[in-house]
Image (spheres, helix red, strand yellow):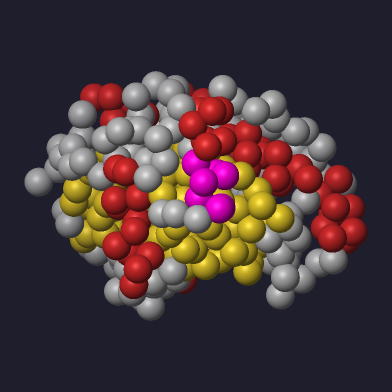
């Protein structure tokens, strides 16, 4: 059973609060991989990663047919954040049954706290030529992390948690 | 469709390296770093991989050659692209020798293998209405124009 370290929890926050830009890696059910950078990230409980569903397309389609995902730090990499979090994801969209549960994470709790993420943690650090003009959130991706492995050079693939 | 990497894309890939994503035929994804990247043409990129890195992805690629990658570090936001193609693990030959030697010289990497990716798909990942837009249908001129209207910054190569 995974329990995030303090360093992991500090890293898995929005970049403007000292966190990280992350890559969310998904796959179609027949093994076509997809990798997309995400800015809105947080932890929940000791083993869940939350990611805003704002502009997800292929990522969303993949998660709907195959919950297996990997999350890793894209930037910054030079602060010891050499982790890959592997687990199972669901996209808790508006309209989910209020009592929907994903490995202990409740849809009502998640959407109440993280359902208007752009207002709670606006992307002030995102450059003007990249930032989106209007954020429309459709839900929150909840990743239940089952294992963590390293991508530190010389230690790639070693199980951490 | 045919992929034509722009000069700016090539610069970002080579300056920052990439996060490489593969998946088993059953759809379980894995990711490793491609710390040294060398663009070998408009639609080919080679990554030097150390023994631990290739140890993670070689068994997967042996069963399923599909690879997706994005630029590492600031490139995750500044180089808002996703590249997809078919990967091959090389452990010998001219391409392996050339890429491994350069990776050793530039980054001190002892390459156990080279991942050679032939690109077949290119996507914009800029947040907003252009997220997910396919770019591999554009001609090189169209793509250069499209990109210059959005970004011009080119990073310096990292040590």
Q: Quadrant of residue A2?
A: top left
Q: Quadrant of residue A123?
A: top right
Q: Residue at x 71, y 55 (%)?
A: B41
User: Could you tell whether B91 is left or right of A159 in the image?
Assistant: right
Residue B115 against residue B17 in the figure, above or below: below
Instruction: Give residue A34's position: percent from left, percent from top.
Output: 48, 61
Q: Quadrant of the C terminus of chain B?
A: top right
Which residue is the extreme one toward the left?
Answer: A1
User: Could you tell whether A120 is left or right of A91 in the image?
Assistant: right
Q: Quadrant of the N terminus of chain B?
A: bottom right
Based on the picture, tell me whether residue B123 belongs to the magenta stretch: no
Residue A23 against residue B109 in the figure, above or below: below
Which residue is the extreme one toward the bottom?
Answer: A30
Instruction: Give residue A69's position: percent from left, percent from top.
Output: 34, 58
Q: Is residue A97 visible?
A: yes
Q: Is residue A137 visible?
A: no
Q: Residue at x 59, y 25 (%)?
A: B158
Instruction: Give residue B9's position: percent from left, percent from top.
Output: 71, 46
Based on the picture, tell me whether residue B99 belongs to the magenta stretch: yes
Q: Residue at x 34, y 72 (%)?
A: B63
Instruction: Give residue A30's position: percent from left, percent from top.
Output: 38, 78
Q: Name the magenta segment's main secondary structure.
A: helix
Compare residues B138 and B42 and report the one nearer the observer: B42
Compare residues B139 and A147 and report the one nearer the observer: B139
* Residue span colored magenta: B94-100
């Amino acid at each position: 059973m995974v329990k995030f370290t303090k360093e992991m929890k500090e890293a898995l926050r929005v970049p403007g609060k000292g966190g990280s830009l992350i890559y969310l890696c998904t796959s179609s059910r027949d093994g076509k991989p997809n990798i997309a950078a995400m800015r809105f990230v947080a932890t929940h409980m000791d083993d869940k990663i939350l990611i805003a569903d704002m502009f997800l397309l292929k990522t969303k389609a993949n998660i709907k047919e195959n919950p297996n995902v990997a999350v890793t730090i894209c930037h910054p990499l030079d602060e010891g954040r050499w982790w890959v979090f592997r687990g199972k994801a669901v996209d808790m969209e508006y309209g989910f049954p209020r009592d929907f549960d994903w490995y202990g994470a409740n849809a009502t709790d998640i959407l109440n706290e993280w359902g208007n993420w752009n207002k709670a943690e606006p992307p002030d650090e995102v450059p003007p030529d990249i930032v989106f003009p209007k954020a429309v959130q459709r839900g929150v991706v909840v990743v239940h992390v089952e294992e963590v492995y390293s991508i530190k050079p010389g230690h790639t693939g070693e199980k951490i948690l | 469709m045919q992929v034509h990497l722009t000069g700016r894309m090539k610069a970002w890939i080579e300056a920052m390296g990439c996060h490489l994503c593969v998946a088993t035929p059953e759809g379980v994804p894995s990711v490793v770093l491609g710390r040294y990247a060398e663009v070998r043409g408009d639609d080919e990129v080679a990554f030097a991989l150390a023994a631990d890195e290739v140890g993670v992805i070689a068994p997967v690629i042996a069963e399923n050659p599909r690879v997706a990658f994005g630029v590492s570090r600031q490139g995750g936001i500044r180089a808002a692209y996703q590249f997809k193609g078919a990967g091959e693990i090389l452990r010998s030959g001219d391409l392996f020798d050339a890429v491994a030697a350069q990776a050793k010289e530039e980054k001190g990497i002892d390459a156990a293998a080279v991942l050679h990716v032939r690109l077949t798909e290119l996507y914009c990942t800029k947040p907003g209405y252009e997220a997910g837009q396919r770019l591999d249908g554009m001609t090189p001129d169209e793509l250069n124009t499209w990109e210059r209207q959005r970004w011009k910054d080119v990073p310096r190569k990292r040590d």
